[in-house]
Image: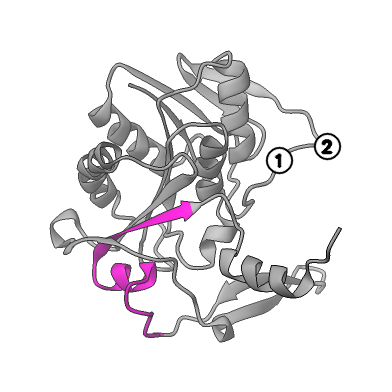
Amino acid sequence: MHILLTNDDGINAPGLGALERIARALSPQRITIVAPEYDQSGVAHSLSLNDPLRVREIAEGRFAVKGTPTDCVIMAIHHILGGQRPDLVLSGVNRGHNVAEDITYSGTVAGAMEGVILGVPSIALSQSYMSGDRESVPWATAETHAPPLIRRILDAGVSPSTLMNINFPNCGPDDVTGVRVCSQGKRDAALLKIEERRDGRHIPYYWIGFERQRSTPAEGSDLAALAQRKVAVTPLRVDLTDYAALGRFADNLDTAP
């Protein structure tokens, strides 16, 4: 099995090292790594259309691209691999979970989404950690639980239009309480905040963030699964059509030719 790896934290991110170890546990024969030269967190499913893409081969089968995760997957399949599709795309392991509305901003999820668009089964992986403690990410949790879980997902089969979003809880490998297939959750929008600061010339600049408050996530959601120290597995579709609304609006808005 040929596995393509990418991420949004950059070619030197520790999570990419964790992902490589996960991939080698699945298929030690052939792995290709194509990841952004620099951190691309929060770029979502963006393409570099106004800037050239530069590719640097760091080592055999390992490439850095000056672009987004989406750029990386496109460059990998259409250029680096010469149009030969891999058997699987793995994106991550992201530093921090990608759940609820995070999914729409996530470059990690976008890398897997582009894999699906190009016809390759794809999985996004993210590791939750204690906010504010970036140096204590429990990578061992993802490394321990990802390989058998990915094998089970592949054995069960994934729809060509579906990508799998996996989030590992903020705990040690032995403290994980199980796996939960769940829906995308929803955060409390009131927790969103804009933090103003001043630079050395007293000119204001701003950070977007969230208040650190406890909330009760909806049962069956990815947020609830992580709160229960479960691995959250959420199937996501590239097709964003709201089919219930489609029928309702068609009845009210469609006109005869």
Which of the 4 image quadrants contains residue 152? Answer: top left
**What residue is pinned by disc 1?**
47
Quarter of the image for the C terminus: give it.
bottom right
Farthest residue in the left direction? 174
Residue 229 on the magenta segment: yes
Part of the protein shown in magenta: 214-236
Residue under label 2? 50
Mark 1 Cα shell of 10 Å, populated few (<14), some (14-19), many (≥20):
some
The vertical placement of 238 against 182, above or below, is above
**Residue at 26%, 30% in the rendered image:** 26
Front position in the image: 58 or 135:
58
Looking at numbered disc 1 in the image, what kind of residue is underneath it? Leu
Q: Is residue 208 magenta?
A: no
**Number of marks in picture:** 2
Percent position of residue 219, x then y: 32, 78
- Left/right placement of residue 40 relative to residue 11 reads right
Residue at 30 percent across and 16 percent down: it is 29
Residue occupying image coordinates x 58% and y 39%? 69
